[in-house]
Amino acid sequence: MLMKTQKSIRYIDQLALFKLRGMTGINLSIHNKNAKEVSHLIKQLKTISTLGYYNLKNYALPYYDSESSSYQNIHFDDLVARFYRDKHLKQAVLHAIEDIETTLNTKISNVLGRKYGPYGYLDFRIWCQRNSKNKFLHNKFMDKYAIQKEQLNFLGKIPAKVRKSASYDMRKFAFESDRVNPPIWLLMNELTLGESIHLYKLMSKNNRDQISAYFGCKTDELVSWLDNINLIRNICCHNGLLADFRLKTKAKVPVEFKTRNIDEGILLRTREGNYTNALAFQLCIIVKLMSKINDKYIFKDIKSAVYKLLDDTTTPQHYGFRNKQMIRKLFDLATEDKVDSLIEY
């Protein structure tokens, strides 16, 4: 059976689709309209030509009623505002994630560099989990062949990272050193967050535990949170929709946010006791890790962005908070847990 060919439609027809499905604030007629009204229509056409129909449609999903096949309680200009409010949220969240990423890289380079020297990381046999199933890598059995494959894959990426690096110290290394591979503390800053997380998963239990101890948690918790943060980072960097994002896989709930009763605490829970997988949960993880990295970190921008996303349809519960007061309480918790676990004296 041949698929139906979809035709490209004009921007004004895309606006008409929103209007036909119940979105308010769209007036397509310019007959007997004053200059201000015509200018407003032109502005809306420019907006949809810039942001894209399907992009805006994603932001309108919470307002779509499937039974009536129409949008409820949403003005086109408010939809555009929601797009930019989500953008501000992503910028604020990414600022915190970058601190988490930098700290993870620093701790990995510290553990590997201190125990095995600046180039010990090149021999995966001495620092990786060996001769057992690695539960963080789909229970892959880490025999000498699996370790060798991981080593070859990783080392094969290094020369390109060295050549493309904008770091002064890395460029100096490439020019002055006869070595192909840089010391671990130079290399870690060139890795993607996903690559750093993969290195952490490869580590021996003792090495992993040293790093998770810095963050005041167990290894399986840290892996769970880092995987989640990597997803969020990709959303922030690739123009995804963060506000309505829902985790598909269950991550570990930080102990600070667990409650005995479902009608207590910051996070919304189902009648069965399951915790929300919405935005509030992602923010709990960020708050938890940042409280260990920088107990003076200011969450004002994230908190402000969340408040601005609220309306009669996208309520605090839509974002996974038990009520509006819990938004403020979430960020207040960050100042209550002040420890110096990241610092070795």
Image (cartoon, helix red, strand yellow):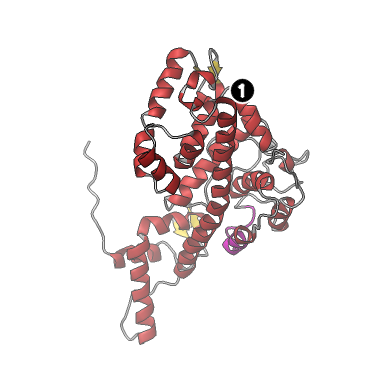
Q: Nearer the viewer, residue 227 or 128?
A: 128
- Quarter placement of the N terminus: top left
Q: Nearer the viewer, residue 126 or 293?
A: 126
Q: In this view of the protein, can residue 250 be seen by the observer? A: no
Q: Is residue 204 left or right of residue 50?
A: right
- Point 67% across, 50% down: residue: 294
Q: Is residue 185 left or right of residue 263?
A: left
Q: In this view of the protein, can residue 317 be seen by the observer? A: yes
With respect to residue 243, does 48 lie above or below?
below
| Mark 1 residue crowding within 10 angstroms, few (<14) / some (14–19) / many (20+) | some
Picture coordinates of residue 176, whole percent (x, y): 38, 40
Magenta extent: 304-317
Picture coordinates of residue 47, whole percent (x, y): 37, 67
- Point 39% across, 28% down: residue: 155
- Quarter placement of the C terminus: top right
81 is within the stretch colored magenta: no
* Total numbered labels placed on residues in the image: 1
- Point 65% across, 28% down: residue: 209
Picture coordinates of residue 117, whole percent (x, y): 54, 28
Mark 1 falls on what kind of element? Answer: helix
Q: Nearer the viewer, residue 9 or 246?
A: 246
307 is within the stretch colored magenta: yes
| Quadrant position of residue 312 | bottom right
Name the amino acid, label 1: Lys
Which residue in the structure is indicated by mark 1?
205
Picture coordinates of residue 42, whole percent (x, y): 33, 75
